[in-house]
Image: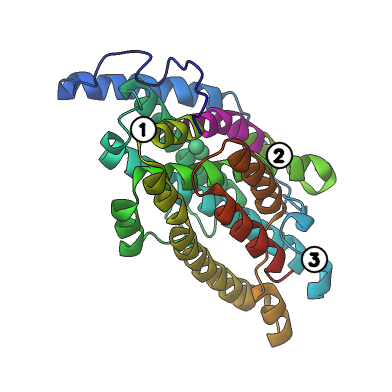
């Protein structure tokens, strides 16, 4: 089966010129200009808006049945803020995957042009910076500056190893999946504006708008790779997404345990409450993003897509609710 590719000025084969490494100073200046252009969009956000300390900042149902935890009103608000922090850290961590992979290994996806890679990296760098800024607004005691380190998701050697080992066809598949999920966070927020802080809602909406082109790039790189390599090889790269997903799920699971420990001691949760909080479930955006991703993946005829989609749907259905 031949995949249908449409013209994309951002992908080689359409622009024709090979990537040439620019002079260091010139590259740095171009990088600065790109960063500044991306940051301007984010600077339009009114960051001075207060986040009321007694209010929820992100819909509870996005994460779990919070009512079942049996919390006081004060604990409910506090746990909600920790959930929002966890989401910010998750995004920063995943953006780290994209930034590091593209900086080190973009040559493994020769169909990506240098300007596209540069813009992609600049946007992810800015996103990570903005989520750090949001963390500081949400919990200045935990994140004392705009550049404070994460509390729950720590970058480890396993992350570096995973990035080195991931073939391009596997990496872009996973990037597509994770970025697809982020597109659905605003939907969760729009469903419960009464449980959302305006600043959080605006940041998540702008982030999703900037992620949509990333999803399109990931998809097109995958289609090119599928077109250019033998189907059996493409199927292997698709299948390899599963062990990487298991690894990433382990990283996120460890981080969630840190969140439970932190919330447990901060809020004085009892053993039963900690146990219930520890039963991490897929978020609403995980479920909606998976539905959308698997539908698209199967529709494109990518090698090895069916078993992967089956496994993803099954994993999301059988995770603890
Ligand atoms: Fe991002
Ligand atoms: Fe992205």
Of the two numbered discs 2 and 1 in the rendering, the one whose residue sits closer to the viewer: 1
User: Tag 1, which secondary structure?
Assistant: helix
Residue at which label 2 appears: 186
User: Label 2, label 1: how many angstroms apart (C-alpha)?
Assistant: 36 Å
- In the picture, the disc for residue 65 is 3
Give the side of residue 22 with respect to residue 101, left or right.
left
Which residue is found at the position 68% from the left and 44% from the top?
185
Q: Vertical placement of 302 versus 153: above or below?
A: above
Which one is earlier in the sequence, the residue at label 2 or at label 1? 2
Pointer 2 with pointer 1, Cβ within 8 A? no
For residue 159, say whether it is visible.
Answer: yes
User: Label 2, label 3: how many angstroms apart (C-alpha)?
Assistant: 19 Å
Residue at which label 1 appears: 228
Say if the magenta span includes residue 214.
yes
Give the side of residue 131 with respect to residue 281, left or right.
left
Say if the magenta span includes residue 307.
no
Q: Which residues are magenta?
A: 204-217
């Amino acid at each position: 089966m031949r995949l249908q590719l449409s013209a994309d000025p951002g992908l080689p084969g359409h622009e024709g010129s090979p990537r040439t490494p620019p002079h260091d100073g010139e590259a740095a200046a171009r990088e600065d200009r790109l960063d500044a252009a991306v940051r301007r969009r984010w600077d339009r956000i009114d960051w001075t808006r207060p986040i009321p300390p007694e209010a929820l900042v992100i819909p509870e149902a996005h994460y779990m049945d919070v009512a079942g935890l049996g919390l006081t009103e004060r604990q409910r608000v506090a746990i909600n803020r920790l959930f929002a922090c966890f989401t910010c850290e998750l995004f920063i961590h995943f953006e780290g995957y994209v930034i590091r992979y593209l900086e080190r290994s973009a040559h493994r996806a020769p169909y990506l042009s240098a300007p596209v890679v540069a813009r992609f990296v600049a946007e992810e760098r800015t996103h990570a910076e903005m989520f750090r800024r949001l963390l500081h607004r949400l919990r200045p005691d935990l994140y004392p500056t705009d550049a404070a380190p994460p509390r729950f998701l720590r970058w480890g050697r396993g992350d570096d190893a995973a990035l080195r080992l991931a073939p391009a066809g596997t990496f872009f598949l996973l990037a597509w999946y994770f970025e697809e999920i982020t597109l659905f966070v605003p939907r969760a927020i729009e469903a419960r504006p009464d449980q959302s802080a305006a600043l959080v809602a605006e940041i998540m909406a702008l982030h999703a708008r900037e992620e949509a082109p990333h999803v399109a790039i990931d998809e097109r790189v995958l289609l090119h790779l599928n077109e250019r390599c033998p189907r059996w090889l493409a199927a292997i790269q698709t299948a390899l997404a599963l062990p990487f997903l298991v690894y990433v799920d382990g990283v996120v699971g460890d981080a969630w345990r840190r969140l439970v420990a932190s919330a447990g001691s901060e809020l004085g949760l009892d053993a039963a409450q900690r146990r219930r909080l520890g039963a991490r479930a897929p978020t609403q955006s995980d479920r909606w993003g998976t539905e959308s991703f698997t539908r698209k993946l199967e529709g494109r005829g990518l090698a090895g897509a069916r078993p992967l989609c089956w496994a993803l749907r099954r994993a999301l259905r059988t995770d603890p609710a």
